[in-house]
């Protein structure tokens, strides 16, 4: 296990949903890595302290209404407003550790609420209540994932992309963020990770179109070859013309041109 994988598994470890094999790998890594051990012990201590706090009955209807209103407001903003918001976030990166800690604490509290509600006697908790709480936890995890993908730190952005693969039923906002990361992130490793994360959405037209567009705009040989593999795996014949241009581009990396020719052969034979 790598250090960047540790934080992504903390929420599941605290909630008790981490598979035994992954929990053992997490414990083994923590024994050999002081930084990850400190992070793990701190998170568990916070979990225990929060667990001792008296819990109020959650107003799931109000939480859902606030979340829906926030997402509707974000969607209604013109591109220029969203761009200014992103620039503001980048200028105020000193606040990001606080925002991340707050988001993590919210996620932990929500998890505790789910656990407590599920552990109550059957008459006190109905199936709709539990379902609503699970939806709230899922939405909070999605919000944290989107926040991580906007961070200045490459490690945090990688963590956000990794978290996106662990979300159940991620919304369109996550898919759009992954596409934006593929198109515009400055780090090659983050762009490569976004390609892997987009594989689970390969049946979506928007994702297939984006990968074809990326083939025309990406200049990193590693990213280009990963994109070629992607369009071949998804049997996307719409990429043929782009692959032909790339295979004939004398300014392109020789290995990329050869890979593009390989992709053309596989798509035409399909």
Image (spheres, helix red, strand yellow):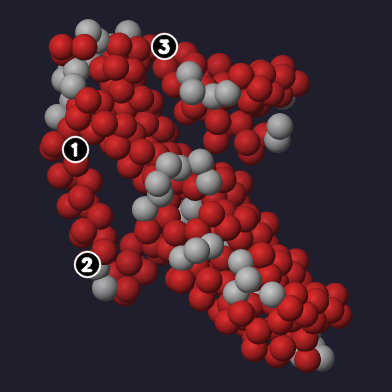
Mark 1 vs mark 2, CA separation in Å: 20 Å
Q: Picture coordinates of residue 62 (x, y %)?
A: 13, 37
- Residue 152 drawn above or below residue 259: above
Q: Picture coordinates of residue 18 (x, y %)?
A: 54, 24
Residue 76: numbered disc: 2
For the residue pair 123 and 154, the one nearer the viewer reads as 123
Residue 48: numbered disc: 3
Where, by quadrant of the figure, is residue 177 drawn?
bottom left
Q: Residue at x 74, y 69 (%)?
A: 225
Q: Is residue 24 found left or right of 13 in the rendered image?
A: right
Q: Is residue 58 found left or right of 254 in the rendered image?
A: left
Q: Local crowd at mark 1 within 10 Å, few (<14), some, or many (≥20)?
A: some
Q: Secondary structure at mark 2?
A: helix
Q: Secondary structure at mark 3?
A: helix
Q: Disc 1 marks which residue?
A: 63
Q: Are marks 1 and 2 in contact (CB under 8 Å)?
A: no
Quarter of the picture containing the C terminus is bottom right
Whichever of callouts 2 and 3 sits on the residue coming sooner in the sequence is 3
Camera-near label (1 vs 3) is 1
Mark 2 vs mark 3, CA separation in Å: 40 Å
Quarter of the picture containing the N terminus is top right
Q: Local crowd at mark 2 within 10 Å, few (<14), some, or many (≥20)?
A: few
């Amino acid at each position: 296990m790598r250090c960047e994988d540790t934080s992504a598994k903390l929420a599941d470890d605290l909630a008790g949903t981490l598979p035994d094999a992954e929990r053992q790998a997490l414990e083994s890594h923590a024994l050999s890595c002081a930084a990850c051990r400190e992070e793990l012990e701190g998170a568990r201590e916070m979990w225990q302290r929060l667990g001792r706090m008296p819990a109020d009955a959650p107003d799931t209807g109000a939480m859902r209404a606030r979340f829906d209103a926030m997402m509707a407001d974000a969607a209604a903003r013109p591109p220029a407003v969203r761009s200014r918001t992103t620039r503001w976030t980048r200028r105020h990166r000193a606040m990001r550790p606080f925002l991340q800690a707050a988001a993590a604490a919210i996620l932990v509290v929500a998890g505790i609420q789910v656990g407590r509600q599920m552990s109550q006697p059957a008459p006190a908790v109905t199936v709709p209540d539990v379902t609503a709480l699970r939806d709230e936890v899922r939405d909070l995890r999605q919000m944290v994932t989107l926040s991580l993908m906007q961070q200045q730190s490459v490690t945090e952005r990688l963590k956000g992309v990794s978290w996106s693969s662990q979300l159940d039923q991620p919304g369109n906002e996550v898919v759009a963020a992954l596409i934006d990361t593929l198109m515009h992130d400055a780090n090659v490793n983050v762009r490569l990770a976004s390609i892997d994360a987009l594989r689970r959405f390969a049946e979506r037209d928007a994702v297939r179109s984006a990968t074809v567009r990326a083939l025309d705009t990406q200049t990193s040989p590693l990213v280009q070859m990963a994109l070629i593999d992607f369009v071949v795996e998804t049997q996307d014949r719409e990429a043929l013309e782009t692959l032909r241009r790339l295979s004939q581009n004398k300014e392109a990396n020789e290995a990329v041109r050869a890979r593009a020719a390989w992709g053309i052969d596989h798509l035409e034979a399909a």
